[in-house]
Amino acid sequence: MKKLQVKCLTWGSLSKISMGNPNAGFTEGNIQTAKKIITPEGSALNYISGQCQRHGIRERFAEVGEALSTPVDGEVETTLGDPASYIDDDLFGYMIAVTGDNRKRTSPVRIAPLVSLFPYRGDRDLLTKTRKASDKGGNMVETEIYSTFMRGGGLIELDRVGKFDSSEIKDKATEIPVVERNRRLSIFLDSLMTLWTGGKQTNILSDISPKFIVFSFQTVKLPFLLEAVSCDTKGKVDAAKLLDSLSNYSTVTTQVIIGTTGVIDSSEIEAITKDDIQILPIAEAFARVKETLFKL
């Protein structure tokens, strides 16, 4: 029987926002809103967009000295479109549509929004912009803020990272060496584990990095973990829901690695003893994912 190829790595995660508004929405009068989505029953859930998270990951790339693809001005700003040379063009893709050069690379790395597990309650932070250089007084500004647990996740198409066909590059189809591919995946995972980004960080510093994460190596590209990870208002993981999902999709998973921290109560998950599920402190879990990737 032919062994099925591992085609993707997916993950589902939980983050905790003690207080913040990392990804603001529109300004309404003197109120800076937070991004929200309305559920079918009418609740407003805060979210942090995938674009915001990708921006933060790019910032982490730059902080470790990684060269990023230069933005190119035009009717629609794009990048150099050189995935062989630049990690962000490889992992996050691009679209170039100019005379004589039409190329597109769909991102092999897909990022889901971080969505609050609980409704927004209308909290606001009051900011006073004082004027010390004159006696004109100050301005009152309000910012919507929230405290919640957020669910996120993503998917990496492992069979596309570091590989480029003729529709994506100027030359014929090619791929980068495996060592470089693994290095880029390692940098991405490090950036995901240490992710913090968004606005209002000067006065309302927020940490959106995962405090509980489930990784799944799969033979089928399906982000089923996005709906499988959740917790209650005290931060206790819903073990039954997660185990049900892992059981339902066990035929397409080859390995599951779970990372935990003390911020999220994962005691029921940690009591599990299954050969195909590894449960580790979060730093060790990320390291184990890297080890597995490098063996593929």
Image (cartoon, rainbow, N blue to C red):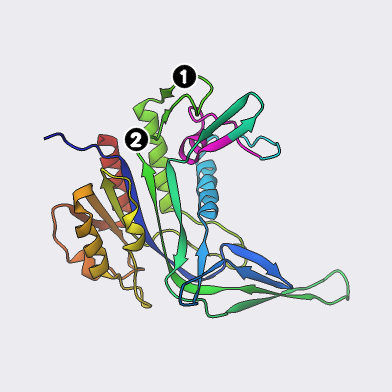
Q: Left or right of 243: which side holds 287?
A: right
Q: Is residue 94 magenta?
A: yes
Q: Which residue is mark 1?
A: 172
Q: Which amino acid type is shown beneath numbered disc 2?
A: Asp
Q: Which image quadrant: the C terminus?
A: top left
Label ID, residue 276: none
**Of 224 and 19, which appears nearest the observer?**
224
Q: Residue 280 at what x, y percent from top left?
A: 25, 56
Above or below, 134 against 199 in this view is below
Please tell me which residue is depicted at 84% across the width and 77% down the height of the picture: 137
Local secondary structure at mark 2: loop
Marks 2 and 1, the one that precedes in the sequence = 2
**Of 106 and 33, which appears nearest the observer?**
106
Q: Which amino acid type is shown beneath numbered disc 1?
A: Lys
Please tell me which residue is depicted at 53% across the width and 51% down the height of the picture: 56
* Callout 1 crowding tier (Cα within 10 Å): few <14, some 14–19, many ≥20: few
Q: Residue 211 at what x, y percent from top left?
A: 37, 62
Q: As drawn, which residue projects farthest toward the right?
A: 135
The residue range painted magenta reads: 77-95
Q: Is residue 86 magenta?
A: yes
Q: Residue 250 at what x, y percent from top left?
A: 20, 53
The residues tagged by marks 2 and 1 sit, at their Cα atoms, a distance apart of 18 Å
Please tell me which residue is depicted at 62% across the width and 67% down the height of the picture: 203
Q: Residue 262 at what x, y percent from top left?
A: 33, 67
Q: Left or right of 221: which side holds 201?
A: right
Q: As drawn, which residue projects farthest toward the front?
A: 40
Residue 131 seen by the camera = yes
Q: Which residue is mark 2?
A: 159
Q: Quadrant of residue 141?
A: bottom right
Local secondary structure at mark 1: loop
Q: Left or right of 127: which side holds 169?
A: left
Above or below, 44 against 55 in this view is below
